[in-house]
Image (cartoon, rainbow, N blue to C red):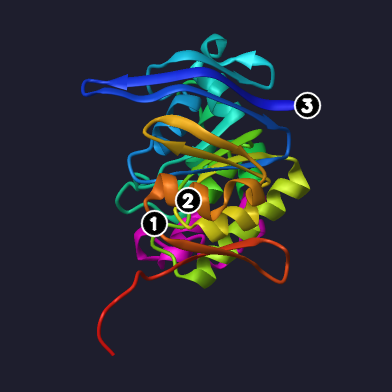
């Protein structure tokens, strides 16, 4: 089954086109990693799929065109986590995660037992119960990222859009967060689309990769087919070595150029 279909997706700002004729198809329960150099259009693609920026072309979620969905329907089907989320001052972890239940509340309504149960389950699964009453801004980077993910998961979306979810995290916390997302993907059948700067992590966790450059799709396929030295050299202007890790995944390592001296 197809969870997300993108055809001819084009986004333009005042300065000109940022994304041009992007095409992608993501199956239910798959993880599409969107990679590319800075300014390639990765974040813009996620925003367009979330319905946050005007665009041309078509976006279909669970066989339903995005433009036919109401704002509430989109919020129930699509969970979007921006690279730099807006965090209200003074808000606790629990109250922040409860914001994810907004698409299910009536106008001027309050959370009911069902909403509290969903939030309680999410806090438990993301190991946030002991932090539930803490102010969100007092948490460490890894804890805060888990709380941001918890808010998105409280929406119970079928499609999860994560824009650089490991920003600011060390390698251990980054791995822990991505392992958590992968476990939720497998257990709940959630489809994931994420942007990632770390190419090794992108290749390890994504089932497919989409490489963007100058707003266009230049490669789409399995990680071993996209993470090649020739493709990365051409589109990142970087010298790298791509080796195979013990688990069979690709590791992308920068290689220094020739230097002079001892």
Q: Is residue 179 magenta?
A: no
Tell me the tag on residue 238: 1
Disc on the earlier residue, 2 or 1: 2
> Measured from the top left, where is residue 144 in percent x and y?
44, 59
* Percent coordinates x, y for residue 73 in the rendering: 57, 20
Q: Nearer the viewer, residue 167 or 15?
A: 15
Q: Is residue 106 visible?
A: no
Dot label at residue 1 = 3
Q: From what the image shows, is residue 253 above or below residue 229?
A: below
Q: Is residue 14 above or below residue 84?
A: above
* Sooner in the amino-acid sequence: mark 1 or mark 3: 3
Disc 3 crowd, CA 10 A, few/some/many (<14, 14-19, 20+): few
Give the labeled residue for mark 2.
232
* Residue segment shown in magenta: 120-148
Which residue appears at 21% of the width and 24% of the height? 15
Question: How far across and down, in percent of the image, does residue 241 sit?
Answer: 52, 64
């Amino acid at each position: 089954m197809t969870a997300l279909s993108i055809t001819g997706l084009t986004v333009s700002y005042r300065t000109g086109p940022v994304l041009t004729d992007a095409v992608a198809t993501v199956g239910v329960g798959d993880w599409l990693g969107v990679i590319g150099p800075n300014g390639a259009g990765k974040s813009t693609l996620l925003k367009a799929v979330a319905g946050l920026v005007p665009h041309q072309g078509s976006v279909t979620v669970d066989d339903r065109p995005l433009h036919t969905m109401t704002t509430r329907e989109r919020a129930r089907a699509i969970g979007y986590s921006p690279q730099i989320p807006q965090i209200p001052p003074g808000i606790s972890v629990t109250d922040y995660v409860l914001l994810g239940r907004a698409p299910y509340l009536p106008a001027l309504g309050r959370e009911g037992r069902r909403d509290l149960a969903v939030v309680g389950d999410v806090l438990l699964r993301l190991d946030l119960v002991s932090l539930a009453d803490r102010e969100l801004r007092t948490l460490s980077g890894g804890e805060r990222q888990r709380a941001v993910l918890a808010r998105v998961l409280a929406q119970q979306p079928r499609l999860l859009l994560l824009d650089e979810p490991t920003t600011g995290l060390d390698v251990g916390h980054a791995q822990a967060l991505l392992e958590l997302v992968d476990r939720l993907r497998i257990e709940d059948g959630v489809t994931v689309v994420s942007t990632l700067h770390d190419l090794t992590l992108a290749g390890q966790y994504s089932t497919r990769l989409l490489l963007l450059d100058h707003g266009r799709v230049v490669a789409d396929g399995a990680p071993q087919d996209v993470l090649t030295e020739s493709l990365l050299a051409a589109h990142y202007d970087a010298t790298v070595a791509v080796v195979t890790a013990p688990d069979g995944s690709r590791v992308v390592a920068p290689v220094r150029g020739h230097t002079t001296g001892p």
